[in-house]
Amino acid sequence: MPEVPVPFVAANFKVNKDGSEVDAWFRQFGEANVDFPGTIVVCPSMAFISQSSRLIEDLNLPLQLGSQDISQFGLGAHTGEVAAAQIKDLVQFTIIGHSERRASGETDEIAAKKVEQALEAGINPIFCVQDENTPIPQGVKVVAYEPISAIGTGNPATPENAGAVAQSIKAKGDYIVLYGGSVAPQNVASFLSQGPVDGVLVGGASLDVQSFLGIIKALTK
Ligand code: PGA
């Protein structure tokens, strides 16, 4: 993986926004003329990956693009799946192993196959773990610590907890570690103030572009 500057901020739109809302988000982001020293990755629905890639290019936005998932399979007879090889020219990152996917049956083994597919296609996984015990497949460089109790609840982990778990993850390898779960403009700096946390994975607070810009601003020194 090429050098990835931190702070690292990833926006996970989940299954929100239609095409015109995605369009508006990128255009409004562009109007803010963001000058951020780190990395910003936006992960819209698969349906809008091509559109988002074009917007980033046309508007010359300082953004990387990510998918929210990727198939565990390669090209072939896998109806409804999207293979890493199909989007490798559009995205630089993909989220893998998000707890919302694990909740619908994704095992550690499946997540590991997805990592393999992503890496083979040259896509960098943002690998989600629920704690320091979730196995991290070979080749992963970016790990997101996302305690289930914090996701979408408005009840984030404490910065101390995020820092301690990030530290344990870093003890296992040379990872960029993100914290995710109810991150908001008001609390984001507190997570980064813990040395081991290199960035954040933001769900709900990324949907409104002004709120997301607030997060970026809070991390811009
Ligand atoms: P949240 O989601 O910021 O809405 O809690 C985070 C995530 O699921 O990645």
Image (spheres, rainbow, N blue to C red):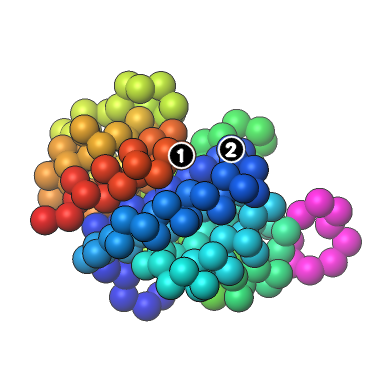
Q: Is there a contact, CB below 8 Å, between mark 1 and mark 2?
A: yes
Q: Which mark is residue 207?
A: 1
Residue 120: quarter of image: bottom right
The answer to which of 14 and 31 lies nearer the viewer is: 31
The answer to which of 160 and 169 lies nearer the viewer is: 160
- Marks 1 and 2, the one that precedes in the sequence: 2
> What's under tag 2, amino acid-wise?
Asn
| Callout 1: SS | helix
Drawn side of residue 73 relative to residue 184, left or right: right
Which residue carries the number 2 mark? 16
The answer to which of 107 and 26 lies nearer the viewer is: 26
Residue 108: where, in percent of width, then height? 56, 46
Distance between mark 1 and mark 2 Cα atoms: 8 Å
Residue 9: where, in percent of width, then height? 33, 53
Quarter placement of the N terminus:
bottom left
Residue 78: quarter of image: bottom right
How crowded is the residue under tag 1: few (<14 C-alpha within 10 Å), some, or many (20+)? many
Residue 16 is covered by the magenta coloring: no
Q: Can residue 9 be seen in the rendering of this structure?
A: yes
| Callout 2: SS | loop
> What's under tag 1, amino acid-wise?
Leu
Drawn side of residue 189 relative to residue 81, left or right: left
Number of marks in the rendered image = 2
Q: Which residues are magenta?
A: 73-81
Q: Which mark is residue 39?
A: none
Residue 134: where, in percent of width, then height? 43, 43
Residue 78 is covered by the magenta coloring: yes
Ligand 1 closer than 8 Å to label 2 CB: no
Residue 216: where, in percent of width, then height? 26, 50
State the predominant SS element of the stretch in magenta: loop
